[in-house]
Amino acid sequence: MPLSAGQLQSYPRTTRFPSENRYRTTDRVLQILLSGDLSRLRAESVAESMGISTTTLRRRLRADHTHYQFLLDRARQYRCEQQLRDLWLPGKCLADQLGYLEVNSFYRAFRRWTGITYSEYKERYHN
């Protein structure tokens, strides 16, 4: 199920109790992930860019009922969808852009996001 930028940005708010200030940490992490190089962004570097420790980042995300890996996965999904709208790339290239160390990890994530394999997606939408 494709996510728009607005849906991705508001995802935590729509699944929890609405409060403008409550999800500032989650919103900021998503903003950093969506604007940065996903192959280099780890929880430690995101926390550092926010001026907090990794432990504090994890604690604040837990208070938002989410975690870093979930937000990273959503950012990767969004970036993947954006890329495939513009230009088809081989799985290895896209996996590298999204920060996956192993192309098979990317293929598993792609299937989880879309319900079809990367090659099936290519056959349906890019032939």
Image (tube, rainbow, N blue to C red):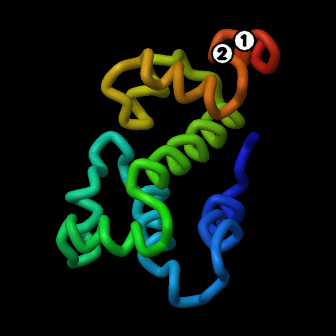
Q: Residues within 10 Å of mark 2 (few under 14, many from 20)?
A: some
Quick check: 51 left or right of 68? left
Residue drawn at (36%, 74%), measured in percent from left and top? 60
Residue 119, image x, y percentages: 66, 10
Q: Quadrant of residue 124?
A: top right
Residue 103, image x, y percentages: 41, 18
Residue 10, image x, y percentages: 65, 69
Q: Quadrant of residue 126?
A: top right
Residue 120 numbered tag:
1
Q: Secondary structure at mark 2?
A: loop
- In the picture of the structure, the residue carrying the numbered disc 2 is 117
Query: Quarter of the image containing the C terminus?
Result: top right
- The correct choice, above or below, for 62 with respect to 67 in the image is below
Q: Residues within 10 Å of mark 1 (few under 14, many from 20)?
A: few
Residue drawn at (47%, 66%), measured in percent from left and top? 31
Q: Quadrant of residue 88?
A: top right
Mark 2 touches mark 1? (CB < 8 Å): yes
